[in-house]
Image (cartoon, rainbow, N blue to C red):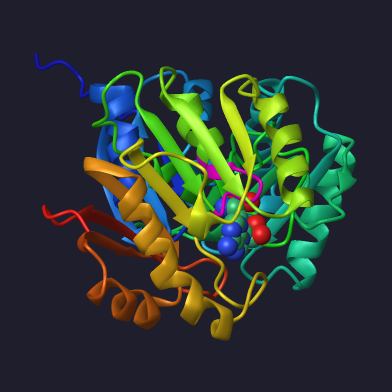
Amino acid sequence: MTNPKPAPAPLFEAEVIPGLESFAIQELRGAFGRKVDQVKTPRAGFIRFRFSGQHIELRRLRSVIAVYQAHLFPIPRPKAFLGHQHFARLTQILTKASRSFDSPPRSLGIAAAGSRSAVMRRLQKELLTTMKLAPAADGKGELFMRMLPNREAPGWEVLVRISPKPFSARDYRRVNMPGSLNATVAYAMTADKALGDKATVVNLCSGTSTILIEHGLTHPQHQLLAIEWKTAALKASERNARASGLHTRIQHIRADARRAPLPCGAAARLYADLPFGQLVGSHESNVQLYPSILREAARLACDDAAFIVLTPEVNLLRRSLKQSPWRIVNETRINLRGLHPRLFVLRRNSTRI
Ligand SMILES: C[S@@+](CC[C@H](N)C(=O)[O-])C[C@H]1O[C@@H](n2cnc3c(N)ncnc32)[C@H](O)[C@@H]1O
């Protein structure tokens, strides 16, 4: 007699900033090894995988916006969700998800294909009543699920978020300013671990220091310097740094990033999320700023330092690079709410300026 095939591990879907899929897959595999299997990227911004660990372990992920557990309902159309058997299964799934939260959710959000149809409206009403939850004011709420026709097999799929808020909404984010960077993008900028202990890391134009905080949380040994000229941004950064527990490690320096008060060759890694003229700065001022920042970063960099830059001003950056000692070694295009910034990894050419 042959042994029955073991049931496959539960199926999950991670939502990521489009363009950052490879960073998220690298983090998933690095953090969970063989517990992660059948990893696929079915479309931009989504990664599907089977996971054999405890699903709350997935809340450790820093490169993803949110993770959902996927459940297949072999039903021809959404009306069948209202039938006793499927409705009971749906409420069980939601109850189980909410029990894994630190405190019981207060609101339920449903994003569904055909959400305005009479059937979906009735389903939503019945779920809210049965689960004793309020409708989500922001559309998502604390307990959040997506419902859509399944792409791989006949039926519908219910995707239930495994956390009461997205992972990208970091607890340390006490102050958000126009231009504050999405934390999962900041994490991706810092994902390269190839830096020795005690390295000095400099963030030019640091704003609220999202990049330095993400760096500091995963690299406990490094000295972190934030260079920013706006007092309000520095104050916001100090509050966020305190909430992250990194306030003693991040040194805030109020200065023009084109003339940082630091010695030559001080930095083993540099970061900049450059102003790009929509929320912060203007294209005209960037034409002056970008070449100056590249020059100053080259002065601050030690010989094998990388400079990791985020900007949607791709042509301007490329033009500015021609007159600088930096070259592009890696480039990732991302989609940030309709903007298409690029994440550049720059290395210095060997001759010093
Ligand atoms: C896109 S924002 C950085 C946002 C940051 N990554 C965050 O998460 O908050 C660019 C920052 O550069 C600062 N900045 C622009 N020009 C500067 C300069 N010459 N020296 C120092 N800071 C500058 C702006 O004040 C702004 O805070």
Left or right, 275 with reference to 180? left
Can residue 250 be seen in this snapshot? yes
Q: Main secondary structure of the magenta part?
A: loop
Residue 30: where, in percent of width, then height? 28, 28
On the rendering, which quadrant does ligand 1 occupy?
bottom right
Q: Residue at x 36, y 19 (%)?
A: 198
In depth, the one of 216 and 21 nearer the eye is 216
Q: Quadrant of the N terminus?
A: top left
Would you place residue 287 above or below residue 174 in this image? Answer: below
Residue 91: where, in percent of width, then height? 71, 36
192 is within the stretch colored magenta: no
In depth, the one of 46 and 150 nearer the eye is 46
Residue stretch rendered in magenta on the structure: 205-211
Residue 285: where, in percent of width, then height? 57, 79
Left or right, 19 with reference to 5? right
Left or right, 219 with reference to 107? left
| Count of numbered badges drawn on the protein | 0
Q: Residue at x 50, y 55 (%)?
A: 259
